[in-house]
Amino acid sequence: MKFLNAEQIRNLDKRMIQERKGAGMILMNRAGLAVAQVIAQLATVRNEHRRVTFVAGKGNNGGDALVAARHLSESGWHVGVLMTCLPAKLEGDAYEAWNDLHAAGIVHQVLADVRDWEDTACDGKVTARLPITGIIVDGLLGTGSEGAPHGVAAAAIRWIRSAHKRAVVVAIDIPSGVDADTGAVADDAVTADITVTFAYPKVGFLNPAAQCCLGHVVVADIGIHETIGADAERESNERIQLIAAPELNRLLPIRPEFAHKRLFGHIGVIAGARGYSGAPALTVTGALRAGAGLITAAVPPESMSALATHAPEAMAYPLDAPDGVITVGALERWGRSLDDFDCIAMGPGMTAADTTRDVVQWVLDRYDGRVVFDADALNVLPRVTLRNPERLILTPHPGEAARLLGLTPAAVQADRLGAVIALAERFGGTAVLKGASTLVCEAAGDPWITFTGNPGMATGGSGDVLTGIIAAMAARPMAALDAARLGVWLHGAAGDFAMWRESQEALTALDITRSLSHAFAMLRNA
């Protein structure tokens, strides 16, 4: 999905309104409904008692907030609305949204003065004592705002930032105080947990400073006509694209009524070593939760207990590996035909033993299907002869990427976009550069970025889970790039749901697998 600037977004709206009478209010209603749906899904993983406070500004962003408030109120939520201007000062569609809210009898407060948002104490300003609910929605400033917030808008932003200590913050379209074109962050700016943006992501989102304010980004489809959208995308100057749910959900058709497990892929997992017995279990669990039909794991005996405990659904085979390390001999004694698999995932927990390179070469020489590489299977790739590299999916973290490219991790992090492009071109497959705002690129293709995921996912085993999720997608009839994009988005979205339920500090790799159901639900609803 292309990134558009504020002018291109305004032109989208203008064309829709010109070509269809009443389209402005239709778009606002769809936008507000999308916000309400995201908030409702967030509540499924947080014990918020269906309470939400909307902070509405005077423009269309505030109108979107009023529509969302009405939808949630009609669904039985306890809704509060804090407005930064008198309703009489609203115009156009925003005023119509206010009339609908008022007719529904929803309680609101008008706080049109800076002093309404802040009290003055002898030691300086302190936040006003306004009611704080579990979820607060920023509907203050949209993509059309220019310059740093001031006056009552700035005061309301400061209140939201203070309330964020005790509440989840959802931003409408863009966090207030973040520039839609440059991504510059004003001194008074909202830091959101979720940003529900409409139709297309904004160019400013690509600024790392802005990314610190966005949280999980949901791109809501509000019904922009395909022709109008295509015209806008052609005007975009950005090569990089966003991995977004409205495009991804087309890759996962609804399961047919008479489906059977072999329709959803048979994955072979070659992983594990003494001291790393849990890695195969995490990979297998990620694949199972991502919908794989069948999984066969070939592992050292030390991994059998973890597999039996966490993934009894998998078919596990203990390799004859007396030293606790997978070897070519152990795989040959296993005797399984690799052609039985629709995808092979290998590397998690294998260690950097000398035999790892031989194992990787042995698999590539005998197998023509998709292979997802992680961990030490990645580290040996420069010493392996690759066949049909377009079928390969590489999933390095910055340290592994640095080894593959002959760089330092700092150099990779300084130019992540250049690094993921270089990985794809050098090895000829699809590269996934893990980390904050994970990147995906195929050889000679455009790079893609995700705005799902959070720092709580920086924990042992998270990458093993990602390997399994991507393998579950790669075992289906879709392009390698699509499998990587889908797997990366699901992994990050599940990590966000796990964070909202568990907190960043308490998040574990298995929490990510347990939250995949919420990620799939969000994907289906996009």
Image: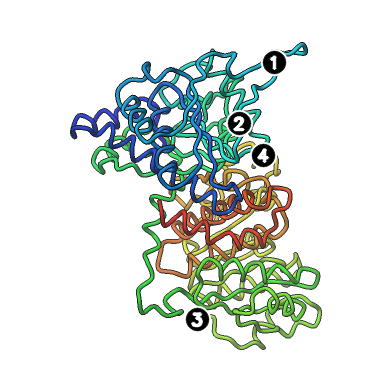
Residue bearing mark 3 = 339
Residue located at (56% from left, 53% from top): 432
Mark 2 closeness class: few <14, some 14–19, many ≥20 residues within 10 Å: few
Q: Are marks 1 and 4 in contact (CB under 8 Å)?
A: no
**Disc 2 or 1, which lies upstream in sequence?**
1
Q: CA distance from mark 4 to mark 3?
A: 39 Å
Q: CA distance from mark 4 to mark 2?
A: 47 Å
**Does residue 311 appear left or right of residue 525 in this picture?**
right
Residue bearing mark 1 = 125
| SS state under label 1 | strand
Q: How is the image coloured?
A: rainbow
Q: Are marks 2 and 3 in contact (CB under 8 Å)?
A: no
Residue located at (64% from left, 36% from top): 414
Looking at the image, is 443 positioned above or below residue 340? above
**Disc 4 or 2, which lies upstream in sequence?**
2
Mark 1 closeness class: few <14, some 14–19, many ≥20 residues within 10 Å: few
| SS state under label 2 | loop
Q: Position of residue 86 (x, y in %)?
A: 42, 17
Q: Is residue 145 visible?
A: yes
Q: Nearer the viewer, residue 304 or 137?
A: 137
**Disc 2 or 3, which lies upstream in sequence?**
2
**Disc 4 or 3, which lies upstream in sequence?**
3
Looking at the image, is 427 positioned above or below residue 34? below
**Does residue 241 appear left or right of residue 504 in this picture?**
left
Dot 4 amino acid type: Ala
Residue bearing mark 4 = 411
Q: Position of residue 77 (x, y in %)?
A: 48, 44
For marks 2 and 1, give the one nearer the viewer: 2
Which numbered tag is attached to residue 131?
A: 2
Q: Nearer the viewer, residue 33 or 231?
A: 33
